[in-house]
């Protein structure tokens, strides 16, 4: 049998990174993972889009934002149109505008090239299991955007949509804590946290923690 046949859960990865040293290091890291396969490595937006448009199949896209011929946002949007394809941003840009633009384009996670890549194996495992890997600084950026008013009294709209406990759970997972860690902090079971997360996703009409943080923030901004 072929390798693909013996690895039914193997994920195909498209890597988009213009820095040769970083691209080679990531490619070598992916090669060490039996459940991942580097399908293609590109150094520009054009190369990535050409590969995708020519029939290239990817379950995961790892992309930088600042590329020689344009923005990685175009790669994220192209990947988002493919069912079951998750995108993880790897970037030096940690400002709010870039983070929110990437999430809005369809990114499932966002890592800074500041040491966060040292744990890339764990981040990829999180992504494959339906999570949204975030560098600590990115998580703090999103949490600041979702923080309730100083009085901590929910205002009409999304603030009142979530219960106090749901706010606590959203804050915890937004900071990158696991369900078990949030459960321990709130002195509840992990299953209870999962139930709260499902309710949060239902109320905000989202499917991931990154989308939940972004949607919560967007509604808070709209309601003023």
Image (tube, rainbow, N blue to C red):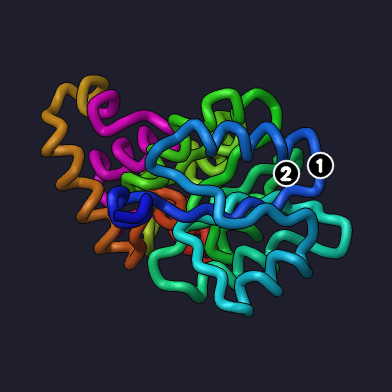
181 in the magenta segment? yes
User: Which picture quadrant has residue 29?
Assistant: top right
**Is 151 left or right of 97, judged from the image as shown?**
left
Residue on which the image places disc 2: 95
Q: Quadrant of residue 4?
A: bottom left
Residue 19 marker: 1
User: Does 71 appear in magenta?
Assistant: no
44, 184: nearer the viewer = 44
Is residue 64 toward the left or the right of residue 60 in the image?
A: right
Estimate the x, y position of residue 208 in percent, counting from the top left: 37, 54
Label 1: state its secondary structure: loop
Q: Say which of 109 and 58 sits in front.
A: 58
In this view, the residue farthest toward the front is: 1
Please name the predominant secondary structure of the magenta segment in the image: helix
**Which label's residue is closer to the chain start, 1 or 2?**
1
Q: Which residues are magenta?
A: 159-182
In the rendered image, the vertical position of residue 35 relative to residue 16, given as above or below: above
Q: How many C-alpha atoms fall within 10 Å of the one at disc 1: few (<14), some, or many (≥20)?
A: few
Q: Nearer the viewer, residue 102 or 82?
A: 82
Pair 1/2: label in front: 1
Tell me which residue sits at (73%, 44%) in the image: 95
Badge number at residue 63: none
Figure check: 150 above or below 218: above
């Amino acid at each position: 049998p072929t390798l693909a046949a013996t690895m039914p859960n193997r994920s195909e990865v498209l890597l988009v990174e213009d820095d040769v040293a970083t691209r080679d290091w990531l490619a070598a890291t992916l090669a060490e993972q039996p459940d991942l396969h580097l399908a293609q490595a590109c150094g520009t937006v054009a190369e990535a889009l050409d590969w995708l448009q020519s029939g290239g199949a990817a379950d995961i896209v790892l992309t930088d934002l600042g590329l020689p011929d344009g923005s990685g946002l175009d790669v994220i949007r192209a990947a988002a149109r493919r069912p079951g394809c998750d995108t993880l941003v790897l970037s030096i840009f940690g400002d709010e505008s870039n983070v929110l633009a990437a999430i809005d384009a369809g990114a499932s996670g966002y890592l800074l090239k500041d040491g966060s890549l040292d744990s890339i194996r764990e981040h990829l495992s999180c992504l494959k299991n339906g999570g949204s890997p975030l560098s600590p600084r990115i998580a703090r950026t999103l949490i600041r955007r979702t923080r309730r008013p100083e009085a901590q009294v929910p205002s009409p709209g999304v603030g009142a949509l979530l219960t106090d406990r749901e706010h606590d759970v959203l804050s915890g997972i937004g900071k990158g804590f696991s369900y078990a860690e949030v459960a321990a902090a709130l002195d509840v079971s992990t299953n209870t946290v999962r139930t709260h997360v499902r309710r949060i996703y239902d109320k905000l009409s989202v499917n991931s923690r990154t989308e939940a943080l972004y949607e919560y923030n967007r509604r808070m901004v709209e309601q003023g």
